[in-house]
Image (cartoon, grey):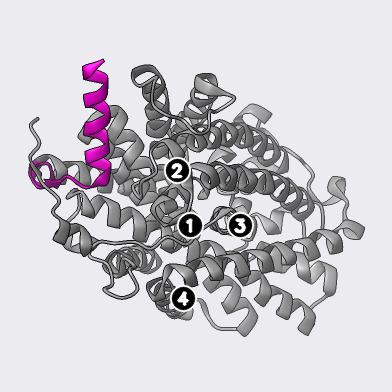
Amino acid sequence: MKTTYTPAGSEYLSQRRLRRHARVLQLWAMGVGAVISGDFFGWNFGMAAGGFGGMLLAVVVMTFMYIGLCFSIAEMSPALPHAGGAYSFARTAMGPWGGYITGLAENMEYILTPAVIVVGIGGYLSAIFGTSSAWEPAWWLLCYGIFVALNVWGVEMSFHVSVVVTAIALAVLVVFWVGAAPHFDLARWASPYFPRGVKPAAATFLELPFALWLYLGIEQLPLAAEESHDPKRDMPRGILYGLMTLIVVSFLTVVLSAGIAPGVAQVSKSNEPLFLGFQTIFGQGLKTRVLALLACTGLIASFHTIIFAYGRQIYSLSRAGYFPTFLSVTHGKRETPQRALLAGSALGFAVALAIHLAPQGSPVGAILLNMAVFGAVLAYILQMASFILLRLRFPNLVRPYVSPVGIPGAVVAAVVAGATLVVLFRNPDYNKGVIGAAVWFLLGIGYYAVHARHTLVLAPEEAAAFALRAEVSET
């Protein structure tokens, strides 16, 4: 199908500027902060189906997947340093259809992930302050308002907040690990490791979407490329240092949470699993409530940084005309994509509220989590396809960093992501939400087929893709 482009003039681009600020520390904090909420809420739901044994094996599998994914992204991001991230990789490798479909999948991931996280924040705040579940949407709205405002304020503020809240979240986890160690008795609190009748392979398979939650979000870092001082040097370091941190954090949190009271049976269905752990360590007093309040910083870190991510992701797709172009206009003084931030927040809140109000028996957070994972694994498969095609079609592309695991690592990541996609549709507890996400995705593809492909703009990602293809044609 034919696509139509409009040149991006100087006036058009001047209304869509971003400001450079980030270096390795800020990128590391952004990557770890985007993910760290997964250690405070979300992963634990998986143990209800596959037990502790299934979760531990699933985390091992997901660790290998993210090693392949992150090394691949660390190669692509400095080679194609644009705010579009995954969309820009796929646009170069697979053309505008591939770029849009990849961007749409990633957009779904980043819109829904903060909605999952804000449900977790609401759960912690309700437990701390004793409010009823009916008030949780008010907590959600308050959180969206505060952190969208911080992101609109400026990129400097966004990165400073990320560094501070990520550091606090890691400190809270360290307190939990140290406090949990004397109470640790895995055989008592995590047995049976595999629920009766569930084989290890089946348990691992069932828990893949929840284990993914312990790493989901680190792949957002390429979206900060146009706000990084030196993306060719700093982006690979930020991604890989962040991944190393998350591997340590994930295994310690899963094992220690399962190995202390109240045990897997209670932890697996809680909206505030770390709060339960602090009650075991410190009792029911004020200290536990204060630590639980501080534990919200883990959720806040991810909430804040993924709001940053969907702001840039919507901005980049809008700047190129895939989404309505008015969404990419940035603040005249602060140079932040305030329209994209507001649009993404409104959509995420609306989805969470709709599920909250609908009659159903499953937790809102678990349903949203599976919907977000649907978008994520689709984006992962398409990004790994982009990596392989870039290696094959553009061998002379300047690559400041080269993945040591290469195409085999990308294939492993794509296969695990594909297996996770299958699980999402096979789990009857949550697959209605996943089916809804699939319908959303198909409607988005229809929008491009009917309208958006006729309104594209030669934004930086598009121009770079054309230039690279022209170089290949000439050689």
**As displayed, is residue 285 above or below residue 1?**
below
Bounds of the magenta span? Answer: 450-475
Q: If you read the primary sequence from the N terminus, does the residue marked by circle 1 or circle 4 appear first?
A: 4
Query: The residue under label 2 is which amino acid type?
Result: Pro
Residue annotated with mark 4: 143
Query: The residue under label 1 is which amino acid type?
Result: Ser
Q: If you read the primary sequence from the N terminus, does the residue marked by circle 3 or circle 4 appear first?
A: 3
Residue annotated with mark 1: 362
Q: If you read the primary sequence from the N terminus, does the residue marked by circle 3 or circle 1 appear first?
A: 3
Q: Position of residue 309 (x, y in %)?
A: 41, 57
Q: Quadrant of the N terminus?
A: top left
- Helix, strand or loop at label 1? It is loop
User: CA gap, disc 3 to disc 4?
Assistant: 25 Å
Residue annotated with mark 2: 428
Q: Position of residue 118 (x, y in %)?
A: 48, 67
Classify 10 Å Cα crowding around label 4: few (below 14), some (14-19), many (20 and above).
some
Q: If you read the primary sequence from the N terminus, does the residue marked by circle 4 or circle 2 appear first?
A: 4
Query: The residue under label 3 is which amino acid type?
Result: Leu
Which residue sits at x=55%, y=65%? Answer: 162
Horizontal arrangement in the rendering, residue 140 relative to residue 56 (left or right): left
Horizontal arrangement in the rendering, residue 82 relative to residue 243 (left or right): left
Q: Position of residue 105 (x, y in %)?
A: 34, 43
- Helix, strand or loop at label 3? It is helix
Query: The residue under label 4 is which amino acid type?
Result: Cys
Residue annotated with mark 3: 25
Residue 66 visible (yes or no):
yes
